[in-house]
Image: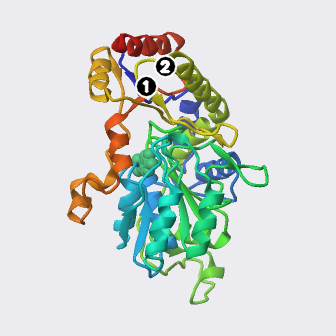
Amino acid sequence: MDAISYGKQFISDSDIEKVVEALKSGWITQGIQVDKFENLFSEYIGVKHSISCANGTAALFMAVNVLKNSKKKVITTPNTFVASANCVVLNGLGVDFVDIDEKTGLMDFRLLEEKLQQNPNDYQGVIPVTYSGLPLDLEKLKEICDKYGLWILEDACHSPGGAYLNSQGLWIGSGSCTDSDVAIFSFHPVKHLTTGEGGMVTCSTEKNSILLKQERDHGLVRNKENYEVPTDDPWFYEMQRPGFNFRLTDIQAALGIGQLERAHENSKVRARIAGFYQDKLRGVGDIEFQEFDEERFKHAYHLFVLRTEKRRELFHYLLEKNIRPQVHYIPVHLHPYYKRQGFHEGMFPKAEVFYKKCISIPMYPTLRDEELEYVVDTIKGFYS
Ligand SMILES: *Cc1c(COP(=O)(O)O)cnc(C)c1O
């Protein structure tokens, strides 16, 4: 039996056919597949503009580069993948963190507001992360950020298909940029959709959409309405701010189109798997689940996270039983680079405790019933 991993991609025969068609089409990068993928993604997420790119990290870099201003620092959560903070540093800005709520693993907005009250002029933006697939109340966050003039970049890598209920009783999709400036996604194989490597930036304004398209393409402007120096020369293009090449290929986009076809269905399967784990594992040992208001938040279940005092022992036990869990996340501020910037243990105690207790167990749509039973029985076996 193959090991059962915490996450896994699913590539169907029809996905493969789409990729082969793209390969044979004579146009393998930045062609009709990329346009189609971006349009279908916008429809799925419920957003105006989607700009595809090389990966989630590139998406974060591009987004910060477009949003940034002259203020010193940007705030994110320590309970995330390093890329959510690195994108700030790589843009020449300072990063700071706000601790989490231990029940959800998400940034605690009360602590954010305290930090902003203490130093209202230091910060220019916030990068909230929908950790594990649980959306944040971005309407609430926007209220706080508007008060202090901060932009919001939602790292929605974990939550395509997730949503929160706003004060008008409307469901607001994660990444829809209803209450944020820009959002980003990753198409790495462990995420909901994969293109091998790949990413997407979403936004609601034409202005940001144009800037983001320049960002992924060397900073080049290719439509003459936007030239600084007017010309009709047919070969012309203009570089207004230097950029990287962060483009997605048509081969990858074709795979993404195939993956999107199953996105709704896969979200339902993820929710069903979560329900199964909650039924079977509630009350087992000292296991704790993420706690959230199901009336107000639709969890996208990128991860299924348990917390236990026996995390280390459980992790090794599962490995022995051919189950490959993962730990999300080593708090970002405890990595050597960030320690050298002055961060240290004890600064964000809830994220540090969360890290000691958390374990992500298998969660992906092609998990078979007998594999799910095996995971549950093995965890019960550990505690008995
Ligand atoms: C995966 C991930 C990223 C980075 O995406 P890549 O495509 O791997 O570069 C950034 N933030 C979060 C929260 C992620 O899970």
Colour setup of the view: rainbow
Tell me the CA gap for discs 1 and 2. 7 Å
Mark linked to residue 309: none
Going by the numbered disc 2, the residue's amino acid type is Gly
Q: Residue at x 57, y 18 (%)?
A: 279
373 left or right of 39?
left
Q: Residue at x 63, y 73 (%)?
A: 207
Quadrant of the image containing the C terminus: top left
Nearest the camera: 46 or 359?
Answer: 359
| Residue 146 pos. (x, y %) | 61, 72
Quadrant of the image containing the N terminus: top left
Vertical order, 78 against 125 (above or below): above
**Snapshot quadrant of residue 211:** bottom right
Q: Secondary structure at mark 1?
A: loop
Mark 2 lies on residue: 283
Q: Secondary structure at mark 2?
A: loop
The yes-or-no answer for disc 1 within 8 Å of ligand 1 is: no
| Residue 333 pos. (x, y %) | 30, 56
Crowd class of label 2 (few under 14; some 14 to 19; many from 20; radius 10 Å): few
Vertical order, 151 against 8 (above or below): below
Q: Are marks 1 and 2 in contact (CB under 8 Å)?
A: yes
Q: Residue at x 24, y 66 (%)?
A: 341
| Residue 170 pos. (x, y %) | 77, 50
Q: Residue at x 48, y 39 (%)?
A: 191
Could you tell me if residue 125 is visible in this image? yes
Mark 1 lies on residue: 287
Nearest the camera: 324 or 110?
Answer: 110
Could you tell me if residue 52 is visible in this image? no
Going by the numbered disc 1, the residue's amino acid type is Ile
Vertical order, 56 against 94 (above or below): above
Crowd class of label 1 (few under 14; some 14 to 19; many from 20; radius 10 Å): some
| Residue 121 pos. (x, y %) | 46, 80
